[in-house]
Image: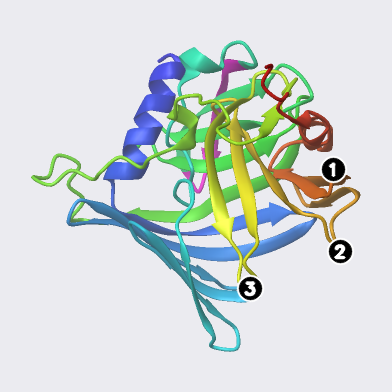
Amino acid sequence: MSPKVLLARMTEAVRSLNYEGTLVYLHQNQLETLSLDHRIADGQVEERLIALSGPIRAVASGKDRVNCVLTDGQPISVERQGGRFLDTEGIDPGVLQNHYSVEYLGRARIAGRETEVVGILPRDGLRYGYRFHIDRETALPLKSDLIDRHQEPLEQLMFTSIKLNASTAPDSETPPDPVRSVRGAPATRPSSQWRFEPMPAGFELVMQHQIDQADGSHVEHFLFTDRLSSYSIYIEPASDDGLEGGANIGSVHAAGRRFDGHQITAVGEVPLVTVQAAIASVHRAAPPTQ
């Protein structure tokens, strides 16, 4: 079976099957254990994630919001951004070929089950890729690795046990709505005074909006993607505590600089060189000629 078909089956399985299981998440040399309950209810994907270690006790997500309960019992509710916990939505091998190589990497056993291994391998150092272990029977991704251009894992997410719900009904009368993914969003042009040239190779602007602050100021947000990886640029009035230079939390990198009275910050699950190139690209549009 071709890698393209395997990835299509995987995406359909994640958004149409009911399942629950225990996972381990390895990042920054830390190992966390998680419990995931994923189900389809009234045509919508709902998930409940319980961290068996770490600061967050529970996360429940529905169509529009993500609700968290912290260890002190304090609830937090935020608007949903992006895909599900296993973010497979919008992966189209056909549009990735200029910057990624999609390859079949063999077979392996995960959680006692046979899997087919597919890699989405970055062709340069501006982006990360993925390695998916796809269950041969259900097509669910039993292991997902975020990898660099040398196929070294940066983060690993793996089921240690998984069970399909007996009431799973992929051909039910109310099919789940597809998740709106930025990976398939059409490219757009900036409608503000800001321009981004040259962008890191392969990335396009797909979304922009204004975030109003409590003090009356606002932040302009621009989202860029290469149809797999993405980063955001935030532009706001300069302040004394704005980020200068680079920073990271695991595989998420950020870079910031001041420009013409504004703080410019780029952040995303991409290499540091990518966010550095992103903030260097920011400039004001040339005034119209008379």
* Residues drawn in magenta: 101-112
Mark closest to the chain's N terminus, 3 or 1: 3
Residue 240 visible, this orientation: yes
Q: Can residue 48 be seen at all in this image of the molecule?
A: no
Q: What is the three-letter code of the residue carrying label 1?
A: Asp
Q: Badge 2, how many Cα within 10 Å: few under 14, some, many 20+?
A: few
Q: Is residue 256 left or right of residue 251?
A: right
Q: CA distance from mark 2 to mark 3?
A: 32 Å
Give the foreground label among 3 and 1: 1
Q: Residues within 10 Å of mark 1 (few under 14, many from 20)?
A: few
Q: Between 105 and 288, which is closer to the camera in this rendering? A: 288
* Relative vertical location of residue 209 with respect to residue 105 in this rendering, above or below: below
Three-letter residue code for mark 2: Asp
Q: Amino acid at mark 3?
A: Ser
Q: Nearer the viewer, residue 200 or 207?
A: 207
According to the picture, the residue beneath numbered tag 2 turns out to be: 241
Question: On the rendered image, what quadrant is the N terminus found in?
Answer: top left
Estimate the spatial distance between the alpha carbons at disc 3 and disc 1, rounded to whole Å.
Answer: 45 Å
